[in-house]
């Protein structure tokens, strides 16, 4: 054969190979493009495209009289990609025998844990069997791999939280501290239909240190207090206190401000208020390491941003403490009030206003907690302004060594 003919033949062969490769790439690209939206069109480009075969099987499975065709495409999808579990789910949904069906769906979930329908079918199956441990295993898997399922699974968990049979399995899963636990717990605490039921779950969790984060604990305590379960709320909060803070317990917690707020519940709450700065600071005459220091910027501040929730039984009480003013300019002064948490009535008592300039001095405030309608109270530092102009305040106020004691009258 002449050299030029050989070269021409090789050149044509190479061009044919390039054309074939280009067609293969193009056909694969077109099949990829249409696999999810138009699997028939995708299969016209690439007949053994695994995703298109699966999508076609899934589509046919939903059409009457197409079960055989759906199963055929599912098997072809498995031949094209044996590691994909989703075709097993289609075959399981087509299977008439319940045992064989669930066995196929188990294979699907094991091979493709992100397949939401497979996991959902297993959750539904195990819940129907009252096998809460197995059901929650699949809930756990789904929440770990597909976070967008939170909105559907959190309500399910909230319902299970009120089912006594399900609580041991639910608590066991939550105590492993999965990444979704705190979000689910917050949702449960806010939405579970049965407070008594979820209280049993929370009690199980409470006995394991660290299982309830401060935000979850605070949300749970807020729910209890909204339902006037003040004693239960207080005991729940106390049970989660670090050991070194138990010595600070009393009718008023942390009255010397030695520990930073942050535990929610019946701890101090410092809230942001433009025009003021709330800190714990050292200074002359402070008992211990620090005291409460509130600085104002000589502007209008509707201030009521230092407060603590109390759970005082009915009776007579006396608030005592120490206070100091540094050029505290305010028409109405700065006062402490005690109000009932569950009513909109006025304060049970108001302390003498603090204003002007003063060294450290003692102050007292007596008050009476009524026998009904006042299971919980708020102690609040506030500017008792009646009109906006009276909200103007500047200077610094200090407070320390505060306590509430029961008194006889």
Image (cartoon, rainbow, N blue to C red):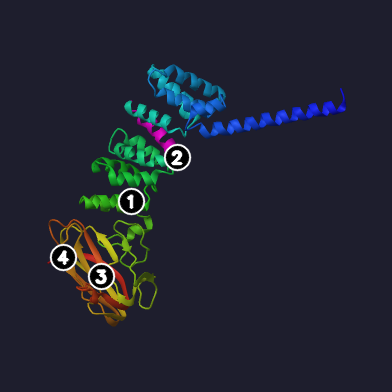
Residue 144: mark in rendering: 2
Of label 3 and label 1, which has the lower sequence position? 1
Residue at 30%, 56% (x, y): give it: 265
- Identify the element where label 3 is drawn: strand
Quarter holding residue 105: top left
Q: Is 133 on the left-hand or right-hand side of 409? A: right
Q: Nearer the viewer, residue 87 or 124?
A: 87
Q: Nearer the viewer, residue 262 or 44?
A: 44
Q: Main secondary structure of the magenta part?
A: helix
The answer to whether residue 168 is above or below residue 338 is above
Mark 3 highlights which residue?
A: 382
Q: How many marks?
A: 4
Quarter of the image containing the N terminus? top right
Residue 217: mark in rendering: 1
Of label 3 and label 2, which has the lower sequence position? 2
Q: Is 364 on the left-hand or right-hand side of 9? A: left
Q: Nearer the viewer, mark 2 or mark 4?
A: 2
Q: Which residues are magenta?
A: 129-144
Q: State how far apart marks 1 and 4 are (Cα).
A: 29 Å
């Amino acid at each position: 054969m002449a050299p030029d003919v050989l070269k021409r033949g090789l050149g044509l062969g190479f061009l044919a190979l390039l054309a074939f490769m280009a067609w293969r790439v193009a056909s694969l690209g077109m099949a990829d493009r249409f696999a999810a939206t138009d699997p028939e069109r995708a299969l016209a480009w690439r007949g053994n495209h695994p995703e298109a075969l699966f999508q076609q099987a899934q589509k046919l499975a939903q059409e009457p009289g197409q079960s055989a065709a759906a199963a055929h495409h599912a098997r072809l999808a498995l031949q094209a990609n044996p590691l994909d579990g989703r075709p097993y789910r289609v075959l399981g949904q087509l299977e008439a025998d319940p045992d064989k069906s669930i066995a196929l769906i188990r294979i699907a979930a094991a091979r493709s844990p992100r397949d939401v329908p497979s996991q959902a079918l297993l959750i539904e199956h195990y819940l129907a069997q009252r096998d809460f441990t197995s059901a929650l295993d699949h809930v756990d898997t789904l929440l770990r791999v597909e976070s967008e399922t939170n909105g559907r699974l959190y309500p399910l968990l909230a319902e299970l939280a009120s089912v006594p049979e399900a609580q041991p399995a639910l608590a066991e899963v939550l105590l492993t501290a999965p990444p979704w636990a705190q979000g689910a717990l917050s949702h449960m605490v806010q939405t579970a239909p049965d407070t008594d039921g979820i209280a049993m779950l929370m009690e199980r969790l409470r006995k394991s240190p660290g299982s309830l984060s401060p935000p979850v604990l605070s949300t749970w305590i807020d729910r209890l207090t909204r339902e006037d379960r003040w004693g239960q709320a207080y005991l729940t909060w106390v049970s989660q206190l670090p050991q070194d803070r138990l010595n600070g317990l009393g009718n008023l917690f942390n009255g010397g401000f030695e520990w930073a707020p942050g535990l929610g519940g019946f701890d101090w709450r410092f809230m942001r208020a433009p025009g003021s700065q709330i800190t714990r600071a050292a200074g002359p005459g402070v008992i211990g390491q620090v005291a409460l220091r509130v600085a104002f910027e000589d502007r209008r501040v509707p201030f009521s941003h230092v407060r603590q929730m109390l759970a005082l039984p009915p009776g007579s009480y006396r608030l005592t403490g120490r206070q100091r003013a540094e050029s505290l300019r305010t028409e109405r002064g700065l006062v402490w009030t005690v109000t009932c948490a569950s009513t909109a009535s006025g304060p049970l008592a108001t302390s003498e206003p603090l204003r002007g300039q003063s060294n450290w001095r003692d102050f007292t405030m007596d008050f009476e907690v009524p026998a009904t309608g006042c299971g919980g109270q708020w102690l609040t530092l506030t500017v008792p302004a009646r009109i906006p102009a009276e909200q103007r305040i500047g200077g610094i106020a200090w407070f320390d060594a505060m306590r509430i004691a029961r008194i006889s009258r």
